[in-house]
Amino acid sequence: LGKTLKVANADEATQKRNIRLGGTVLIESCSKHSVPLKLFELVVELTGSNEPLLYQDDAFRTPLHAVISQLSRPDLCQFLVDEGGSAALESLDHSGLRPIDVLTQRILMLVERLRYLQKRVLA
C-alpha cells in the first residue's frame, strides 16, 4: 500500500488513481470494526491529501457515510469530520442523503426496533 500511494511528484493521472485507491481502501475498511484509525491517517499522509476521505464509491458513499452507518466508531467519525471538513458533512450518497441523514435513519430504526421489542416483552 505504501509504495502504491506514495506520490511525492506524481503526475495528475497517477494522483487521481492513488486517491481512488486510497478512498476505496477507506470505504471498505469502514465496515470492519477492528481496522485501526492509523490506517486512515496513513492514507492521508501518503497521498498528501484529504481527497481519499471524500472519495465516493459507485453508490456515492464516502468513508463517512460508510462508517456512520455502523454506529460503532466515534473515533473514526471524528477523524473523518476533522480531516474532511464541510465537504465530508455535505456530500450526498445515491439517495441524496448526507452522513447526518444516514445517522438519523439508523437511530430512528434502532428506536423503532426497541419499541417493538418492548411491546413484545410487555405483552
Image (spheres, grey):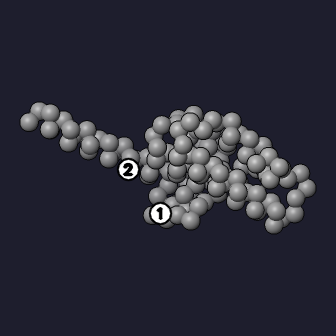
Examine the rendering and report whether any part of residue 16 can be seen. Answer: yes
Looking at this view, name the residue that lies furthest to the right.
9
Image quadrant containing the C terminus:
top left
Label 2 belongs to which residue? 105
Query: SS at mark 1?
Result: loop
Side (left or right) of 40 relative to 57: right
| Label 2 crowd (10 A; few <14 / some 14-19 / many >=20) | some
Q: Position of residue 25 (x, y in %)?
A: 65, 51
Mark 2: amino acid: Gln
Q: Position of residue 38 (x, y in %)?
A: 69, 36
Q: Earlier in the sequence, mark 1 or mark 2?
A: 1
Q: CA distance from mark 1 to mark 2?
A: 13 Å
Query: SS at mark 2?
Result: helix
Mark 1: amino acid: Gly
Q: Position of residue 51 (x, y in %)?
A: 71, 54
**Which sits in the foreground, 93 or 47?**
47
Quarter-wise, where is residue 45 in the image? top right
Q: Residue at x 58, y 51 (%)?
A: 28
Side (left or right) of 70 relative to 5: left
Label 1 belongs to which residue? 96
Q: Contact (CB < 8 A) between labels 1 and 2? A: no
Side (left or right) of 12 relative to 42: right
The circle drawn on residue 81 is none
